[in-house]
């Protein structure tokens, strides 16, 4: 059971916009930054969004994210087949003194 | 460029120990913490702990206290993670990742090491 809650799956057709939610608590998302990772099949997670809504260089601006209270969301616009991957939210948890992750959302591009 | 290169796959029997390595390059080793995160087959990510390469201080996830030990060798810019009393549910891909601060984002990850625990 993951500390952060994500929907297990999401889907969309090419060109569509999809959003993935992430719910936590006051000890993690409520107090600390949320980061998002993309994991392509058979590869390590890759930083996609950091500090709630910042994109590392090389990440297309089709990816955006936001945070409000104890929840966060990732949005992908102009969906492409190469976006098919697992997406994880992550935050530092002050109560656990460690990183907590969502269970991951498998994005399918139909 | 920043690289975290991990050791190869391991197969262990229940009750044994495994020691994995994570060799850093492309940055100043002592300026970044190293974390270990694992992912069981088809499952999500689980944080295991953190080591400060400067002094070697560690913090472990409560669930793994007593079974996990993280060490470092500054001369080779390598961090090690040893997990003892292995069980079948320790079967997972183990990743190392770095952060610039204790609770800062995990910006670069190793390629992962598959550990299979089977009799």
Image: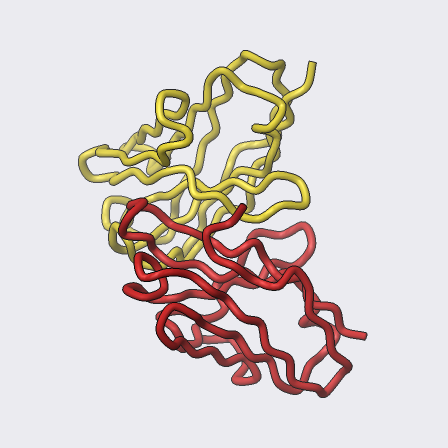
Position of B20 relative to B106 (above/below): above
Residue at 49% in and 62% down: A89
Image quarter (top left, top right, bottom left or bottom right) of the N terminus of chain B: bottom left
Left or right: where does residue B80 sit relative to residue A2?
A: left
Position of A37 relative to A1 (above/below): below
- Compare residues B35 and A52 and report the one nearer the observer: A52
Residue A108 coordinates in the image, percent (x, y) = 74, 68
> Which chain is in red here?
A
Q: Which image quarter: residue B50?
A: top left
Residue at far right of view: A110
Residue at 43% in and 79% down: A66
Left or right: where does residue A56 sit relative to residue A103?
A: left
Left or right: where does residue B18 sit relative to residue A100?
A: right
Q: Which image quarter: residue B104?
A: bottom left
- Compare residues B28 and A61 and report the one nearer the observer: A61
> Which chain is in yellow here?
B
Residue A65 coordinates in the image, percent (x, y) = 47, 78
């Amino acid at each position: 059971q993951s500390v952060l809650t994500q929907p297990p799956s999401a889907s969309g057709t090419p060109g569509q916009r999809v959003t993935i939610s992430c719910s936590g608590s006051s000890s993690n998302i409520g107090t600390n930054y949320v980061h998002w990772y993309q994991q392509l099949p058979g590869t390590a997670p890759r930083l996609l969004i950091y500090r709630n809504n910042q994109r590392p260089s090389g990440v297309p601006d089709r990816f955006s994210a936001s945070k409000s209270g104890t929840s966060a969301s990732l949005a992908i616009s102009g969906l492409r087949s190469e976006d098919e991957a697992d997406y994880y939210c992550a935050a530092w948890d002050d109560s656990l003194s460690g990183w907590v992750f969502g269970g991951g959302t498998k994005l399918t591009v139909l | 460029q920043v690289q975290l290169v991990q050791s190869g796959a391991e197969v262990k029997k229940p009750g044994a120990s495994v020691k994995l390595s994570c060799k850093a390059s492309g940055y100043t080793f002592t300026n970044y913490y190293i974390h270990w995160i694992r992912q069981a087959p088809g499952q999500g990510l689980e944080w295991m702990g953190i080591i400060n390469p400067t002094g070697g201080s560690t913090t472990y996830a409560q669930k793994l206290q007593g079974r996990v030990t993280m060490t470092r060798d500054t001369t080779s810019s390598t961090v090690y993670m040893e997990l003892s009393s292995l069980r079948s549910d320790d079967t997972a891909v183990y990743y190392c990742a770095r952060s610039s601060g204790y609770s800062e984002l995990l910006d670069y990850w190793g390629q992962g090491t598959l550990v299979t625990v089977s009799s």
